[in-house]
Amino acid sequence: MKRIFALLLLIWVISSLAACKQETKSKSGEEKWVPEKAIEMVAPAGAGGGWDTTARTVAKVFSEEGIIDEDIGVVNKEGGGGAIAWTYIHNLKGSNHHMFVSSPPLIFVPLNGQTELTYEDFTPLANLIADYAAFAVRADAEWDNLNELFEDMKKDPESISIVGASAPGSMDHMQFVKIAKEAGVDVTKIKYVSNQEGAPLTDLLNGSVDVYSTGVAETVEQVKAGKIKVLGITSPERLEGDVLSTFPTALEQGIDATFVNWRGFFGPPNMDEDAIQYYEEKFKELSDSEAFAKIRNQYGWSEMFMGHEEYKKFLKEQTEELTELMEELGLAQ
Amino acid sequence: MNTVQGLWQGFQVAFSWEGIFFVFIGVTIGTLIGMLPGLGPITAIAIMIPMVYGMDPTIAMVLMAGVYYGAVFGGSTSSILLNAPGVSGTVATSFDGYPMAQQGEAGKALAIAAIASFTGGTVSIILLMLFAPTLAQIAVSFGPVEYFALMFMGLVAISSLSDGSAIKALISGVLGFMAVTIGIDAQTGTPRFTFGNANLLEGIDFLVVALGLFALAEVAFLIKNRNNVGIEKTQNIGSLKLTRQDVKEMTGPLLRHSPLGFILGVLPGAGATIASFISYITEKRFSKKPEEFGKGSIKGLTAPETSNNAATSGAFVPLLSLGIPGSGTTAIMLGALLVLGINPGPLLFQDHPEVFWGVVASMYIGNIFLLILNLPLIPYIAKILKIPRPLLISLIIMFCMIGVYSISFNIFDLYLLLAFGFVGYLFRLFAFPAPPFILAFILGGMMEQSLRQALTISNGNFMILVESPIAIGLFILSILSFAFPFIKNRKIQKA
């Protein structure tokens, strides 16, 4: 008898607890979803790279400015150009407490055939920043603008070599290809050298290669010191800053193409609508904060906020554009 | 500003209580990280970046630099005592350091390593101070062709890394070459030998190979030979004191490999690991008694230990005078400088001399700290060997696993570690030398990539390889180093 009583009591306790949980859930649906535990932010690369830096600075501002109260832990998951981390997040379907930082490689790596996953397998939360590409040559090089360089490349594409830090079919290569194609260069003949171990800048300075395809920020100090000159950048408009504002865009040189190295955050598939909305708002708040503006400034990043829907549309366009380009190069798998 | 003024300013920063405090913290963290297999300075420094935000840039750099060279300093400990290299720059240290410890001279081996590290570090700081702006030119003088020649020179020596059969050494080297081709090929972006496994796309991490081939294989052997006598000897730490003869043995390598390591460190992409290997093999190549190497030779321990620390300081040349990071760790420090509001580039030297000189001055102090931190601790650290065998073996396995897991938090790497442990065990069983494998693994990857970069640039024309005077010089050195043992033998025969 005693035992049955205890069992009944247990059932009552469990069911009331469950009801209780139900209640809070429906309540939060009406009000607002908030994180219930620590948030895990994954950087799909080793410590110190662009993804890692973005994740760590964002997590820091979120906490220090009190935008998100729950703890945010940054975790590095290196491997496969990001694919290891993507698989990890993809397996956490429906979790509202995981996200990863990404950029154009999320489009390139699937196109290269290194993973089955694409951006469509995740929940785009918000884009935060933009970086642009710069094409630099030695200060004493014969070319003074992109058109002069591309003219020579049209005549004899095999006489000019381009160096970058990423693999062929990834960012440093494709950003150059995109602009060169618009200028009428036969992009299948471009000689691209990938230098991932040492510094590609060294290869430019010692004359091993002719052109360095990189991010705008990497060139500033070298230009200041008079070692290299920037023939063109891929932003839609000129950038702000002492040296930055002197870099001509490809557009103003009559080449109708831009390339943006966007950086934003993605959640696992099937994230709750409420959670998406929550993060979208919080990222907006972060993007508008003074603390983050300071960080953007320090790293030379431009502001580029996009919410969930807008981001999805943007990613679709980017993918279509790049797929076409990679197919032409025979790199798409 | 001249050197004296600059250094004076630097010492003012370094000798402020803040400076001394953070140098101390930096080198202590570095030593500890170095001692634990697998935990490298890269991770430690990356985690520090958000913490140093808002700090005085010079002090922050002093702290991070301390972690960096401290780790290479401390890394020798686990190489010598456990055959489990703490950081990749200290793999070559285990070649002769571990046999010394096995012969009951752990104390002496650690003392030699500490003195070699200190000398290499200090000589290289002096060179850094005197010649940094000039040396910056050397740093950018190496393109794909020159790197290919440098790696070629290293690989020529593979056959000399074996005590017995040169064929076995070559087979081991070829296997190392094959292992390094696994992963996405940098020049085409195509996955090679990954068999559709996403975990292999990034290639195999150097530490997985080193800890498997050396530490785990050693552990397996200890287990196999558990009933053999002679353990008492191994547990013996021996005296720390160096005899006059020991010091004499050390002097030559100290003088040779401080500058050599420094120059190799200055080259972006070469770094402490390659420097230590090249120093080890050149020392062996030109030694009068190459047969002693690998069996506890003082010269064989001193050469790589001097060189890796010298290279670590050398790596600051391209970073601070050109804004070019030469290694993963210096790349992170470059990022840190940005966070601290300093733009690293060719103008850093002019615009922020206090950062350059502060770091240089702090490195003098840091090296002295490292010496007084490490020397008195040797008897205590060496007591690790007194831990009962079964416990010690479990500890080594555990540390290897933690180290490998912390590279990318991927369980797959642990299976790889076990696989390499097994390969290493087979190597030992059939008397194949493991060093050629690791040498080919380290140099081979860069050698292949530089060759192909060079050929892309020249549209496939091999003549590009002999168009550079530096490369020609290195090729001639390779031939000399190859021929040297034969010439020496003939001389001996004639005499």
Image (cartoon, rainbow, N blue to C red):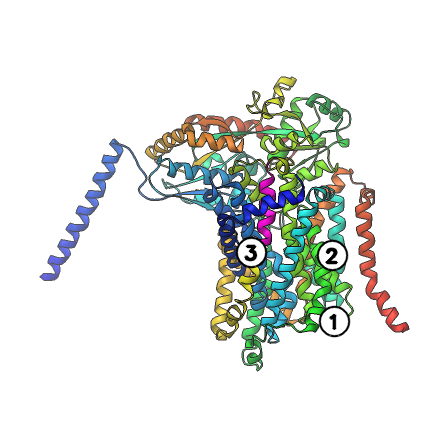
The disc label shown at residue B209, or none: none
Give the CA distance from mark 2 to mark 3.
Answer: 27 Å
Q: Which residue is mark 1?
A: B291
Residue B353 against residue B86 in the figure, above or below: above
* Position above or below: A240 against B134: above
CA neighbours of label 2 inside 10 A, class few (<14), some (14 to 19), many (20+): many
Residue B71 circle label: 3
Q: Which secondary structure, mark 3?
A: helix
Report the magenta residues as a range: B352-367
Question: Which residue occupies the foreground of this view, A288 or B336?
Answer: B336
Q: Please, which chain is the residue tagged with disc 1 on?
A: B
Q: Which residue is mark 2?
A: B155
Mark 1 in CB contact with mark 2 (< 8 angstroms): no
Mark 1 or 3, closer to the camera: 3
**Mark 2: which amino acid?**
Leu
Asked whether residue A121 is drawn in magenta, I would say no
Specify whether B492 is left or right of B279: right
Which residue appears farthest toward the left when viewing the image?
A1
Q: Where residue B317 sits in the image (x, y, percent)?
A: 66, 45
Residue A170 in sight: yes
The residue drawn where x is 74% and y is 71% is B291
**Mark 1 belongs to which amino acid?**
Glu
Q: Nearer the viewer, residue B100 or A19?
A: B100
Decide: is B61 above or below A122: below
Secondary element at tag 2:
helix
